């Protein structure tokens, strides 16, 4: 069954945890979708895990559209949320609506996600008024990493915690259908979840949220040098892949691959005719 804004809202009401993973290509999206995931995030994290950038700031609209469309071709039932990249919505309400429309029309997303609270509420309202679902993103917002002075937990003191609560309520009022809470203390995230009527999706925010999201490369331990505290490894796929690559190299160099069962036959008579006519 296709996941929608309505079904995700029903999951919150029924205390049925929402599952979300990132995906950036057709093959991975197809596998994740077939596993039964509720939502797929085409995150601007693709800049780091797919394109090798140091952060998400260099990701373009064209990058997001390209990867979102590929994911949409692979996922049939998951609700696809696509990130709006840095400076695609901060500049004006007009730019925000135009770019959100491109992600829906060209990227085939089911919703767009943007970072920020009170400062982007006019953009959220305008995008929603254009009949485009919006997912908000509060707490540690990676596009603001330079302003934060690095990747740091947000909302640890009274003033900062109250600010996140205020912004969560504001984005809901502006029309957001969900909100991602990243690197927020667990008790604060749980409190915010109870204050909102829309679902919360946590990443590094404890299990009191209505759902969870992880970067799929992180949860599969594909990169040994990337292991945030909030990540649980559900498989050692990186190690398995490197071993498989090494086994392939060895088998190819030794001549063990391809073996007879991997090749196609031709009759000796045909080969004799070929060689006789040379």
Image: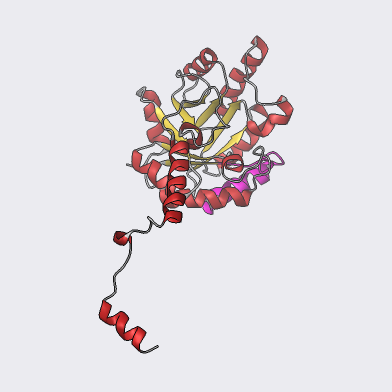
Please count the marks in the image: 0
Residue displayed at 52% across by 20% down? 205
Q: Which one is in front, 134 or 67?
A: 67
Residue displayed at 53% across by 53% down? 105
Magenta highlight range: 83-106
Image quadrant occupied by the C terminus: bottom left
Residue displayed at 46% across by 39% down? 40
Residue that sits furthest to the bottom in the current view: 277
Residue 140 visible to the viewer: yes
Measuring from the top left, give residue 133's x and y in whole percent. 51, 39
Residue that sits furthest to the top in the current view: 158
Q: Which one is in front, 109 or 126?
A: 109
Residue displayed at 38% across by 44% down? 31
Q: Is residue 91 magenta?
A: yes
Q: 2 left or right of 167? A: left
Measuring from the top left, give residue 121's x and y in whole percent. 63, 32
Measuring from the top left, give residue 131's x and y in whole percent. 52, 43
**In the rendered image, which quarter is residue 77 located in?**
top left
**In the rendered image, which quarter is residue 142 located in?**
top right
Q: Which one is in front, 156 or 216?
A: 216
């Amino acid at each position: 069954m296709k996941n929608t804004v309505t079904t995700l809202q029903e999951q919150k009401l029924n205390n049925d945890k929402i599952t979300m993973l990132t995906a950036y290509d057709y093959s991975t999206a197809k596998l994740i979708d077939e596993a039964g995931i509720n939502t797929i995030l085409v995150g601007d994290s693709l800049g780091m895990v797919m394109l090798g950038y140091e952060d998400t700031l260099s990701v373009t609209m064209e990058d997001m559209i390209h990867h979102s469309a590929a994911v949409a071709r692979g996922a049939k039932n998951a609700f696809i949320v696509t990130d709006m990249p840095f400076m695609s919505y901060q500049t004006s309400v007009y730019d925000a609506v135009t770019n959100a429309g491109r992600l829906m029309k060209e990227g085939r997303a089911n919703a767009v996600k943007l970072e920020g609270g009170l400062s982007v509420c006019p953009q959220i309202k305008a995008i929603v008024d254009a009949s485009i679902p919006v997912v908000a993103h509060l707490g540690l917002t990676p596009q603001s990493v330079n302003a934060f002075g690095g990747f740091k937990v947000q909302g640890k003191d009274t003033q900062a915690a109250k600010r996140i609560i205020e912004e969560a309520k504001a984005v809901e009022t502006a029309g957001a259908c969900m909100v991602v809470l990243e690197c927020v203390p667990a008790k604060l995230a749980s409190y915010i979840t109870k204050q909102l009527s829309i679902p919360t999706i946590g990443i590094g925010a404890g299990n009191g949220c209505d759902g969870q999201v992880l970067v799929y490369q992180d949860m599969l331990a594909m990169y040994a040098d990337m292991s945030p505290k909030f990540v649980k490894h559900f498989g050692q796929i990186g190690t398995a892949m490197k071993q498989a690559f090494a086994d392939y190299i060895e088998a190819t160099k030794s001549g063990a691959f391809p073996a007879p069962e991997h090749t196609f036959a031709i009759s000796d008579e045909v080969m004799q005719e070929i060689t006789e006519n040379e």
